[in-house]
Amino acid sequence: MKKFLALALSLVMLLTLAACGAKPAENDGAMKSFSVTVVHADGTEKVFAYESAETNVGPVLEAAGLIKGNAGPYGMEITEVDGETAIYSTDGAYWAVYVGEEYAMSGIDTTPITDGGVYKLVYTRG
């Protein structure tokens, strides 16, 4: 019985450490340049250029005031970009995140920055 409890406790500790280690890093020290194109509801586009040592796109855009949002079950839910609001629960619209021309497979706060990367935030009506 003691071996079982010790094994179970070890497993719980290992899983806890793994979960804590899965949190995205916020700064890796290497400066990277990237751009973000914002496509507004009316189709107009604006391009913003950034340089940062952050690891992920979201913290940079939030600190610069380009995006605002709320913590959601899958990361940051973007509610505003460049002064334009999109809230799915009230207006059926949301901000889609793209890496290059591909729909992002992660939220903005966990999308990694690549040097020379091109990102896009597109106002999208569901």
Image: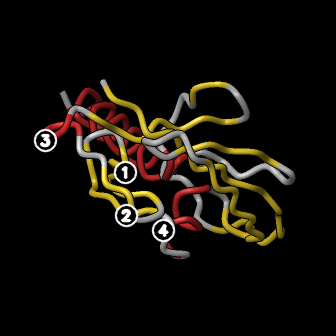
Q: Nearer the viewer, mark 2 or mark 3?
A: 3
Residue 121 percent coordinates (x, y): 54, 44
Give the quarter of the figure containing the C terminus.
Answer: top left
x 70%, y 56%: residue:
47
The amino acid at mark 2 is Lys
Residue at numbered disc 1: 78
Residue indicated by mark 3? 90
**Are the residues tagged 1 and 2 within 8 Å (C-beta)?**
yes
Task: Please give the residue where the numbered disc 2 appears in the rendered image.
Answer: 68
Identified by mark 3, the residue type is Thr
Q: SS at mark 3?
A: helix
Q: Is residue 11 left or right of residue 72?
A: right
Q: Is residue 91 above or below residue 37?
A: above
2 and 4 marks in contact (CB < 8 Å) = yes
Q: In which image quadrant can residue 101 be found?
A: top right
Toward the viewer: 28 or 33? 33
Q: Residue at x 32, y 58 (%)?
A: 69
